[in-house]
Image: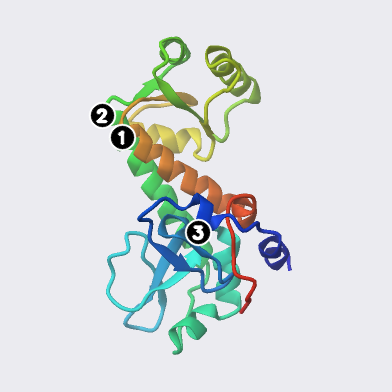
Amino acid sequence: MQLETAVQNETRQTQSRQAPGDTQRRCALTRAHRPKTDLIRFVLGPDGTVVPDLKERLPGRGVWLTATYDTIADAAKRKAFGRALKTDAKAPDGLAEQVDGLLTEAGLGAFALANKAGAVVFGHTKIEDALQKGRTIALVHASDAAAGGCRKLDGKAKAVTDGQGLPAICVFTADELGLASGRTNVIHAALVQGGAAQKFLAAASRVERYRKGIYAFADRHGLDTEQE
């Protein structure tokens, strides 16, 4: 299976990546030990249905899974929740899609907060000005933006960073970005330095990795060879 092949090809780099003090958990499907930020916690609801606990606040014994769409979909199909909890556990239909929606909601919420904090710049002229002043930490392109406009701004970012470029978030649609910022037709934006921008960057990157699947971790994380 595709997930199993990807898991078997992951490199053993988790320990070197982990910062001192990070808390790790073990993925119930792949058996990989990862920082909690790379996993999603699930608990059992009163009716025996599995519930995602992205904020890690719900009571009860938790089941941790690598935060990717394919891992969660495969865990539901293989009944990994019941084995981990040692009880009957029903994974609702579309659980992986549900988690995608929750992560997207969290990411767009962080974008709205960054915008309120003045950490988001809109419009080509203002974005280019922020790039020239060296204030930009990342670019935001709508997932349905024209490729030419993305290349133009990415090229300008490379030009002002000696060819290194800047991270580019491309996971939200123009409509989603517009609703989150209270604007219309948000195709491109830039994040400027600050804590609110960093929080959005982290949340958006989590959505991106989730949708890419287990391969997003293949060159960064180790795993146990034991499989369920």
Q: Earlier in the sequence, mark 2 or mark 3?
A: 3
Query: On the image, which quarter does residue 145 sit in?
Result: top right
Quickly name the residue at label 2.
117
Q: How many neighbours does mark 3 have within 10 angstroms: few (below 14), some (14-19), or many (20 or more)?
A: many
Q: Is residue 185 visible?
A: no
Residue at left offset 71%, top offset 60%: 9
Quickly name the residue at label 1.
196
**What is the basis of the colouring in this image?**
rainbow
Q: Quick check: 171 left or right of 7? A: left
Q: How many neighbours does mark 1 have within 10 angstroms: few (below 14), some (14-19), or many (20 or more)?
A: many
Amino acid carrying label 1: it is Ala
Secondary structure beneath disc 3?
Answer: loop
Nearer to us in this view, 147 or 223: 223
The x and y percentages for residue 107 are 40, 44
Amino acid carrying label 3: it is Ala
Report how far apart the C-alphas of labels 2 and 3 lie in the structure: 28 Å
Q: Is residue 199 visible?
A: yes
Amino acid carrying label 2: it is Ala
